[in-house]
Amino acid sequence: MKSLRRFFTRLSSSVTSREQEERLREEIAQHIALQTDENLRAGLSQAEARRQAMLKFGGVEAMKQDYRAERRLPLLENLFQDFRFALRSLHRTPGLTVFVIITLALGIGMVAATFSMMDAMVFRPYPVPRSSDVVTLAGTTRDSSFEDFSYREYLDIRDKTASYDGVIACGYMQEVGFSADPRATPRVRGGMMVSGNYFRVLGVEPRLGRGFRQDEDQVPGRNAVVVLGPGFWKREFASDPSVIGRKVRLNGAHFTVIGVAPEFFPGLLIFGGPDFYVPLAMARVLSTNPQKNFFEDRDDRELQVKARLKAGVTLRQAGNELAVLAKTFELEYPNLNHTRGAAVYTQFQQRTLENGNWRFSVIFVTLALAVLLVACTNVAGLLLSRARARTREIAVRLALGAARFRLIRLLLAESLIFACLGGLGGIAIGCGVIAWFQSKRNIVFMTDLPVGVPFEMDTRILAMCIALSALSALLCGLAPALQSTRTDLVNGLKSADVDIPGRKRLWGRSMLVVAQVSTSLMLLTASFLMARSFQRSMLSNTDFVKDHLLISSFDPRFEQYNAAQTKQFYKLFAERVRQMPGVQGATLMHFVPFGQEGIDAVAFVPEGFVMPRDRAIFSSAMDTVDEEYFKTISIPLLRGRGFLASDTADSPRVAVVNDQFAKHYWPNADPVGKHIRFDNASGVRLEIVGVARTIKYQDNRERPMDMVYVPLAQHPVSRMTLMLRSSGDPLQLIPPLKDIVRALDVNMPMFQTRSYEELYLNWAVRAPQVGVDLVGAMGAVGLVLTIVGLYGLIAYNVSRRTREIGIRVALGAGRNTVLRLVMGKGLVLVSIGTIFGLLMGFGIERAMNAMLFDAGHVDLVAYLIVVPLLLAATMLAAYIPARRAAHISPIQALRYE
Amino acid sequence: MAPKHKTDVLQGTLALMVLKTLDVLGPVHGYGLARRIEQISGDLLAINQGTLYPVLLKLEQEGVIASEWGASENNRRARYYRLTREGRKALQAEAHDWEQTAAIIARFFKAKAEDLT
């Protein structure tokens, strides 16, 4: 208690008045006066009386020191002094200060921005309480470790496992026709079906109303209830609390709003959150596969299953239990579950194993760290030369008895200030880069669904920025501080310039330059590799037509059409659309190439193909298209024919495959006339009637993949996209198209309506360009910093050797000799740096190939561009100060000082 | 003349002496305190008088003594120290502790070998 009180008094007197000092002086004076009087009374002479009094009092200064130490907190005070001093000395060199701060800010900001990306994609926990208990359950096959489950399988998992405090299931976010007013034309929103226990198991309490009751998810189609997402409630209902109990229409069916999910729970998806949730029991309205019975068919696999681990149950135990259950499925349903296992994943495993998108963020973070490294070495180099310039000052301080530790602290205080300001700048730059990412949202995601870029400057990233700043303060400041306080006193005092053990001294700085050159070479290599592989990827398998095309999607289920009505709708629609003026071609397709929607997969067995022993089926991507498809989008048919109007529901089933598929299963034979069976060896038999050229279907980086096309007439799908070829601006076809749709059904929504070229460019060109730009920016920053760093070193060297060069010139050294002398050092450093940089470049190329491109070979052209570029730039950086050295006039140089 | 045997004073002891002196004398200035301590200890205790001031400051910060300006014998301004109520309590506690410690130590010195068997 007492000591606490004392601490606060001391703390306050550390920062307050000098009057205490005054008081002490007065007390001492009075004390000595009184003692002197006493001594006078004892008969001493005036002078002697005072002398004795002083003697008796003891050392005044020493006592004052003690007094001060008692009065305040000396440690804190010294720190405060250090900072004041550091601020003052930084103020004297504003150029350097600003440069250092900008350099650090760039480094820290880059790392912050890229790490926010990586955090969102890999680390950020689910926004639910005790999120680490939430695990993902997934089916495994030979081809994939993240297979969805069917409704029946989910029920079995839920009821027959003991490892969990609840097992939940959810479908994918999907397009749902929504209207708040039953008479209005539905708009497309993103809905998700979830199991009745979804919110309860996740521990998410609705902010308004309630979550689903268990009984609301038991009888198919009975309880039409919906929980709204927080963002949707805000946008669509203006945060109106009276929304509870209101009726809304989803895909033509009436639903009652029972709750609103809380703000902190936008869903478990990384990109974007569902607008609303409905119980699985309402799957009839939302199921994506109309050809299967969601509630009965064990192979209608549309559900992702997650569960909350019971306390004390390990992941391995849960995994074993699930694997055993998967085995029983396999025994019970050998047709449907052959070689189908199951596994349990943590959130981290799920995020990193399910797909490779996160790898970009790892590459970005690595490169950003490299930028930070270059920035730090640069700053360290600058501080080193600054410290050298202060040799004399420091020598004086040491000679006067300053403790080395105290001086190091003083110098570290400077770098701490750099780090603080640099950190602040870094946060600002990080925010800027993140805002730039956000501004690309509409380019990366060209969709009507509620998706977004989840990269943000949250507390996690802020904390990381602070840690990075502190780290870089140490990194930049410690070496210079240690080195400059090791000054040889005698020489240091003699002249600020003399640097006798010079070789050793500069070794550290040379290392820094080598590190910079090599790191920035790596950065440049990475950015060129990225740009080049991106360009290469755009050239292959993308030669279908993209311009003058309008696309618009339809889903008659939004209006509760049955199969016959849907067929009729599309038939009439296609007929009328083809008669529109300005339309040169029209086709209906299920999947739009580069359309950002997931592509359907189909299980099949090629007839006459010897199946490997351990598998019963193959799987391929599948698309449903009409007879005009190949012509409209200009995918050439290499063999056989496309679909014809004569391929109807009653005629023999046919399919077109791409040449990748054909090569895969009939490498030496003509695939036309061969047969495949869907689902399994006893499934529907289709005759292959044509082979289409392979294109890229989803993105630029994809490897050639198998594709099966089936005709719409034989394989009705509800959600189709119309593609119109126009003679002029495709967007001008929208109004007449609307009229045609309205004539067929007033309320039929048109969605994802846009120019196909825009869609393609955004997804295939502009979105990857964001990454290329980012890496390019990092490469440029690295290069600039390196140039500045090298320039700084050579310039410093020149100024240090001014006298020596002067003498050399006076003794008859020519300009070229001096130039060589000065630049030689830079050349050596750059060469060493280049060698290391090449090694690192190969390393990063291997990493990028492994993670992103699968290119597998060394891109020589990239190096042929990058290495000379770097050499030229660094030589220039060395040449400028060297030229100045060559022009040193001996008279001036020797008069110096 | 051989010098008298003088004792080093621990700071804690000095603080206790200050408190006790203030208790006895009432408000007094720094010089008075120093003189008084010297007199009572009978010159056995040789301290630099200056040492007193850091101790006074520490005690004041702890709140056991307080100080204010007043006029001194030679009609100059002097800082007068006095015990606070808290200080009185502290003094009692410390005096008690001290007596106990002294008593224990004293017993150890009195103890003879045979007492311990």
Image (cartoon, rainbow, N blue to C red):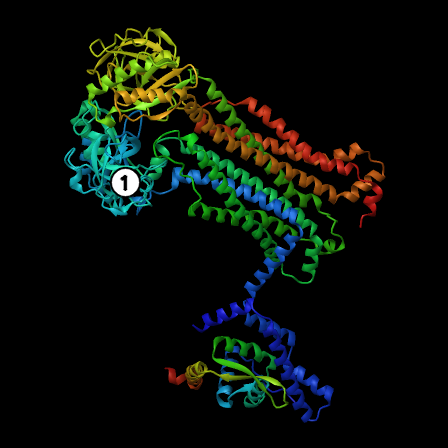
Camera-side residue of A631 and A27 = A631
Looking at the picture, does residue A566 appear above or below residue A70?
Answer: above
Q: Position of residue A794 (x, y in %)?
A: 70, 39
Q: Position of residue A883 (x, y in %)?
A: 75, 35
Tell me the quadrant of the picture where the N terminus of chain A can be found. bottom left
Camera-side residue of A602 and A748 = A748
Q: Position of residue A247 (x, y in %)?
A: 22, 38
Q: Chain of mark 1?
A: A
Element type at marker 1? strand
Q: Is residue A281 left or right of residue A722?
A: left
**Residue at screen point 34% across, 10% down:** A691
Looking at the picture, does residue A488 appear above or below residue A633?
Answer: below
Q: Is residue B33 left or right of residue A335?
A: right
> Counting other residues with Cα less than 10 Å from the Cα at mark 1, is it few (<14), some (14-19), or many (20 or more)?
many
Looking at the picture, does residue A391 appear above or below residue B98?
Answer: above
Q: Which residue in the protein does label 1 denote? A: A228
Q: The residue under label 1 is which amino acid type? A: Leu
Task: Say if residue A251 shows up in the picture.
Answer: yes
**Residue at screen point 21% across, 8% down:** A651
Looking at the picture, does residue A744 appear above or below residue A385?
Answer: above
Q: Is residue A788 left or right of residue A465?
A: right
Count the numbered circles shown: 1
Q: Is residue A307 left or right of residue A728?
A: left
Task: Say if residue A700 shows up in the picture.
Answer: no
Q: Position of residue A426 (x, y in %)?
A: 52, 44
